[in-house]
Image (cartoon, rainbow, N blue to C red):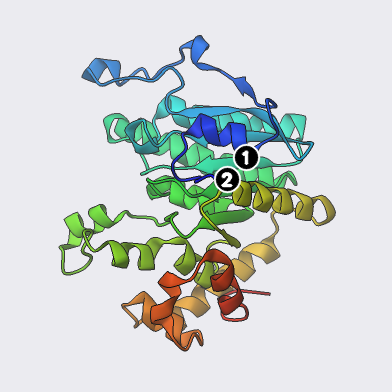
Amino acid sequence: MSSYLELTARERLARVFDHASFEEFLPPAARVVSPHLGQLDAPVAFDDGVAVGRARLDGTPVFVAAQEGGFMGGAVGEVHGAKLTGLLRRAIAERPAAVVLLLESGGVRLHEANAGLVAVSEVMRAVLDARAAGIPVIALVGGANGCFGGMGIVARCTNTVVMSEEGRLAMSGPEVIETANGVEEFDSRDRALVWRTTGGKHRYLLGDCQALVADDTDAFRAAAIAAVARYASASAELTLEALEREQAMLADRLERFGELSEPMEIWRALGIAKPEQVPMLDAQEFVELAAGARVGVN
């Protein structure tokens, strides 16, 4: 068993996809770096914190991207976002079987402010354009920095989200909520609360992710293979009906749980008799327990 959480972006690319199959677009040797960080005397990375390219997944050609959480927490700047957008646009032209995004990001890079915000919005549009063209986009979330801010929205724009319990997914990070609304609203130091609220198990129960796996590279690989295979026989095209179903799920979720403030109250409302046991279950035990209890399950 190899922990996905503990790997770097390039180590994940090497282990999730077929051996030596990753071919990078704009590698570090090209030295395409942020035009903004140097002006602020901030460190730069020659790949700007994201590796993009093509690879094979169980023999199937896919386009891939992996954010590096070790560089500014995977935060998105102008170049970082442009690489993701370019990858998705190239996918529409070359039509791989899928685009697989290994996401780990705290959101927009504050150093680049508006440029970063524009970059994330372009990534969102590119994801939806790829889906509209019938190319499935799959997100894997299991890094130590989670997937927050604009990249949290990007993840939810994809066809399928695969998470581990250790992965976290939300619009605003715990520290951001605490800073804006006070510790009474959300105590970012309460790690159990953070994971109950933003972690993979809660997101799986609410329908925000479609697969929950152990913190294991092979488990993420198997889930990605299964997702790609599923769209090989079913349409991945974005439709109005799919958007309406998503909207209905969100409306139902708000109506059912809008007055509840603690995730365990939501789990109990979903029919889990002993919600306090959920954090102690491994991924497979949890998925079995959650069968039939999830929001938005067809």
Residue 131 seen anywhere in this rendered image of the structure: yes
- Residue neighbourhood size for the residue with mark 1, other residues' Cα within 10 Å, grouped as few (<14), some (14–19), many (≥20): many
Residue at 49%, 15% in the rendered image:
28
Comparing 250 with 61, the one in front is 61
In the displayed structure image, the side of residue 119 where residue 139 appears, left or right: right
Q: CA distance from mark 1 to mark 2?
A: 6 Å
Q: Amino acid at mark 1?
A: Val
User: Could you tell me residue 32's position as x and y percent?
Assistant: 46, 15
What amino acid is found at the position of numbered circle 2 in the picture?
A: Thr
Q: What residue is at 36 percent from the left and 17 percent from the top?
A: 35
Q: Are marks 1 and 2 in contact (CB under 8 Å)?
A: yes
Question: Percent position (x, y) of residue 253?
Answer: 48, 77
Residue 16: image tag: 1
In the rendered image, the vertical position of residue 194 relative to residue 176, given as above or below = below
Q: Is residue 258 visible?
A: no
Q: Quadrant of residue 193?
A: bottom left
The numbered mark at residue 217 is: 2
Q: Which residue is depicted at the point 67% across and 64% down?
A: 242
The disc at residue 48 is none
Residue drawn where x is 38% and y is 49% of the image: 149
The x, y position of residue 222, in whole percent, is: 68, 50
For residue 112, above or below residue 216: above
